[in-house]
Image (cartoon, helix red, strand yellow):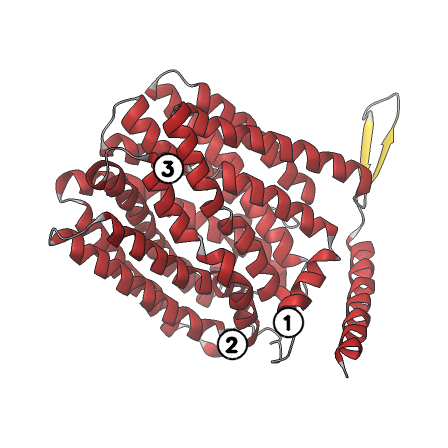
Amino acid sequence: MSQTFASLRIFNYRLWFAGALVSNVGTWMQRVAQDWLVLTALTDESGVAVGVTTALQFAPFLFLSAWAGVLADRVDHRKLLIWTQVGQGVLGLGLGLLTVLGHVELWHVYAFALGLGIVSAIDAPARQTFVSDLVPSSSLPNAVALNSASFNAARLIGPGVAGLLIAVVGTGWVFLINAATFGATIAALVMMRSSELHHQERAVRGRGQVREGIRYIRRRPDIVVILVVVGTVAALGLNFQLTSAMMAATEFDKGPGEYGILGSVTAIGSLSGALLAARRKRPRLRLVVGAAFGFGVALTLMALAPTYPLYVLTCVPVGFTALTMITSANAAVQTTTTPHMRGRVMALYMMIFLGGTPIGSPIVGWIGETFGPRWSIGVGAIGALVVALGAAAWVVRDARLTVSYQLSRPFVRVRYPTPAEEERERRAQAAEDILAQQLADRSEQP
């Protein structure tokens, strides 16, 4: 088996990969069907209503992620994930029945989107950190990248299938099929071999654990930069369901089939980015920043595409650069974080990554309604370019690298710390964190 798919040699990870792939296909089908239902059946092509739906689905990440991260650091990941899969399946079933029976209203979609957001906010930190239970630490970057490949293979399949099913049987059946797909993940979790899991150090119950996670991140400027880049791009640029729906229905006057194709073509680029990321053993900050800049350029081309076929073509580089950024950021944060802090750090990462959507989606939707759908894409392009340039300036000035210049090739040499140097820095930082925690505990004593 090639290096790209190395983690699939592990039995438990193979089960997880297969179950997650099936579930992710259903999730993408539901996302497409939900936005199309709101845009074309429950409103008169209201971008704001679609934005509000998306915002409600992601708003819980802003309020629950920190607590969910502490929970993920304390409890058994597998048991928690079984319950969250059950919850998401029940919600999909409820919305599907309402739609099939003809009783669905806009407020119903809002309510189910919020409920799904609550369960997803609890699920996300455990799902992210569960990968480290399935593979040894040396395989973690590969496993994280393959998770993204699974998600985007599903994104390649799901929207196209959803578009066809919407046209043939309606949105309600798409929701019901999504509910059934969560059974695949539950079955995979139940069938895993407990003896082969790599159980991570668990955080003990105590006071101030959320603050401890925030202090840890504040002392890691590389993680802070990643959070700023990912948060900005996610809030303004990663609104494909909203912007693609508006462009398909309003700008190009297309139906659900053509709308579903946009998601599938975007996933071609995303899947390519994820598979390339699976070959990288050590993701770096510079790749996150460079991919964010490339994403801004690709979005600019997308916003300017004059015809539907050209718009479809621009979906490939948009998906590729977006997934390269997301996968590299995720792997860089996970692989450099202390195991007993990983749940809280990843929770804060997911809070910013997904929690920016309820802030950005209504704004992007309003821009699309007011100034046209092309500007809803353009604002994301501007945000990505600005934050990438700002992060690049920080990397050159403040990151742990040395830049030298010479008259012969290569004209510019950039030297990063060696793994041994980074390990010494991490140990020194860990000692500082322990000391800071001891001082904080003393200050809280009467």
Disc number placed over residue 209 in the picture, else none: 1
- What SS does tag 1 mark? helix
Q: Give neighbour class at mark 1: few <14, some 14-19, many 20+ (Cα, 10 Å).
A: some
- Amino acid on which disc 3 is placed: Leu
Compared to residue 319, the image places residue 34 above or below, namely below
Q: Quadrant of residue 259?
A: top left
Residue 154: x %, y % from top left? 36, 47
- What SS does tag 3 mark? helix
Residue at the image position 26 percent from the left and 44 percent from the top: 33
Compared to residue 49, the image places residue 341 above or below, namely below
Q: Give neighbour class at mark 3: few <14, some 14-19, many 20+ (Cα, 10 Å).
A: many
Question: Along the polypeptide, which appears first: circle 2 or circle 3?
Answer: 2
Residue at label 3? 242
Q: Are marks 3 and 1 in contact (CB under 8 Å)?
A: no
Question: Along the polypeptide, which appears first: circle 1 or circle 2?
Answer: 2
Single out the residue that lies furthest toward the bottom: 446
Single out the residue that lies furthest toward the front: 446
Residue 170: x %, y % from top left? 16, 44
- Amino acid on which disc 1 is placed: Gln
Q: Are marks 2 and 3 in contact (CB under 8 Å)?
A: no
Residue at label 2? 75
Which one is in front in this view, the residue at disc 2 or the one at disc 3?
A: 3
Q: How much space separates mark 3 and mark 1, taking CA atoms?
A: 36 Å
Residue at the image position 20 percent from the left and 55 percent from the top: 96
